[in-house]
Image (tube, grey):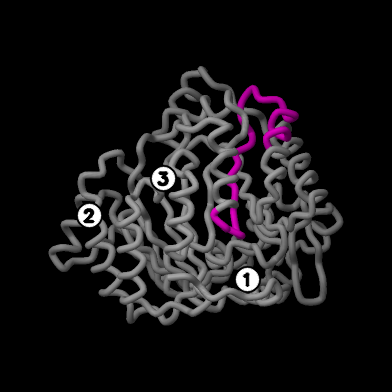
């Protein structure tokens, strides 16, 4: 299952051109516990884990002819690292037998720090996992307790060390900023801890209040008071400046790579409107013109697939106007921006003078300040 090794130059080429091939996302809907802020679909019961696997393979088999070659496979969740090793290996081998994978396939697996030791990390590496996205969220213990994480800072540090010892050369760390009552300097101290491991990739997400989460309940009742927009903007700019100083490529609003070679090839597909096949409950798919989403229930998903039915709960065919609008919305979240021809003559000079856009002959892209208001830029430049 190991992927073919290649040079840094070849990795860079693959990262920048990966948007031309489809990606495959497998939603692993199992978690040991639910974090306070998380709105992603997951269940704490693992009773249907093996039934879920069989359904995923069946769904892949039914859709394999709707997509050509895949050059990324992403195991997300939920918490994929709660799966037993034998089940992960079974999943990977059977997907390879069903789908058409590029020989330079990038396999990413999301992991919780509490699920990793050296032996586990080594087994994952042997299976062919080429990239690990580690859900650290913070190296500050008080912050981790506030977020409801099941690991502490020391556990996260050990997990990164064990991944390195297991010869992983592409590690991504997830961090959350904008924590209520946490001074910016404490957030930056957590970032410094992350930088000490020289990770190839960092995803830095602002804490958001999602409906139907414990955090939403606490904010609504006044128990927790979120930071205001001005404080969040200051925190973002200081965080981004530090990562830039450390040499990281700020290629998307929340994502930073040590070089173009280490951009997330899979996530880039979403921003470039590239087809992605989503397998599993709550997974989303896009084939270039049609988008659909599966039911958010493990039992319902398993039963529908077992009965030979589609597990789809939502589906739409995008109009040309929708495709263009989405290209603008997604493109303006990235440093690559969008083709100037799409947004020509629409407030470009004004937004450029405000320091929000970089405009060249062919491209329009956001500045660092522009990334702070990427959604508003998209509204201002939407040509539809």
Instruction: Report the residue marked by disc 3.
Output: 40
Q: Earlier in the sequence, mark 2 or mark 3?
A: 3
Q: Which residue is mark 1?
A: 15
Point 61% across, 60% down: residue: 169
Q: Disc 3 on helix, strand or loop?
A: loop
Report the mark closest to the observer, 1 or 3: 1
**Where does label 2 land, which residue?**
50
Instruction: Give the Cα separation between the discs numbered 2 and 1.
Output: 34 Å
Count of labels shown?
3
Is 43 contained in the magenta span? no
| Residue 60 lies in quadrant | bottom left
Which residues lie in the magenta part?
166-190
Horizontally, residue 116 falls left or right of residue 303, namely right
Pick the front one: 180 or 10: 10
Residue 285 drawn at (x, y percent): 40, 66
Q: CA distance from mark 1 to mark 3?
A: 27 Å
Q: Residue at x 50, y 41 (%)?
A: 113
Counting residues from the start of the chain, the first of labels 1 and 3 encountered is 1
Q: Secondary structure at mark 2?
A: helix
Which badge, 2 or 1, is on the more N-terminal residue? 1
Image quadrant of residue 249?
A: bottom right
């Amino acid at each position: 299952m190991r992927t073919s090794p290649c040079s840094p130059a070849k990795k860079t080429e693959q990262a920048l051109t990966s948007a031309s091939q489809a990606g495959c996302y497998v939603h692993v809907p199992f978690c040991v516990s639910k974090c306070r802020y998380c709105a992603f679909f997951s269940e704490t019961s693992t009773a249907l884990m093996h039934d879920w696997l069989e359904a995923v393979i069946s769904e892949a088999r039914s859709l394999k002819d709707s997509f050509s070659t895949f050059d990324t496979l992403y195991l997300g969740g939920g918490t994929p690292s709660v799966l037993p090793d034998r089940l992960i290996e079974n999943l990977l081998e059977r997907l390879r037998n069903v789908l058409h994978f590029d020989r330079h396939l990038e396999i990413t697996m999301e992991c919780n720090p509490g699920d990793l030791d050296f032996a586990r990390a080594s087994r994952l590496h042997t299976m062919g996992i080429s990239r690990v996205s580690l859900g650290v969220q913070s190296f500050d213990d008080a912050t981790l307790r506030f977020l409801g994480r099941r690991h502490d800072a020391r556990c996260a540090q050990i997990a990164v060390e064990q991944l390195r010892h297991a010869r992983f050369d592409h590690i991504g760390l997830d961090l959350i900023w904008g924590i209520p009552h946490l001074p910016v300097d404490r957030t930056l101290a957590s970032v410094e801890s992350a930088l000490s491991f020289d990770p190839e990739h960092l995803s830095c997400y602002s804490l958001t209040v999602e409906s139907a989460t414990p955090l939403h309940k606490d904010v609504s009742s006044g128990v927790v008071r979120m930071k205001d927009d001005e404080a969040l903007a200051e925190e973002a700019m200081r965080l981004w400046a530090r990562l830039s100083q450390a040499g990281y490529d700020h290629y998307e609003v929340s994502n930073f790579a040590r070089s173009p070679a280490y951009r997330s090839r899979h996530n880039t597909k979403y921003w470039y409107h590239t087809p992605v096949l989503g397998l599993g409950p709550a997974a989303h798919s896009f084939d270039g013109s049609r988008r659909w989403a599966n039911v958010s229930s493990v039992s319902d998903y398993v039963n529908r697939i077992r009965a030979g039915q589609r597990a789809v709960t939502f589906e739409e065919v995008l109009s040309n106007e929708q495709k263009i609008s989405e290209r603008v919305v997604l493109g303006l979240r990235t440093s690559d921006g969008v083709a100037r021809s799409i947004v020509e003559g629409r407030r470009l000079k004004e937004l450029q003078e405000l320091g929000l856009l970089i405009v060249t002959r062919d491209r329009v892209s956001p500045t660092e300040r522009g990334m702070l208001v990427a959604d508003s830029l998209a509204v201002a430049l939407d040509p539809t």
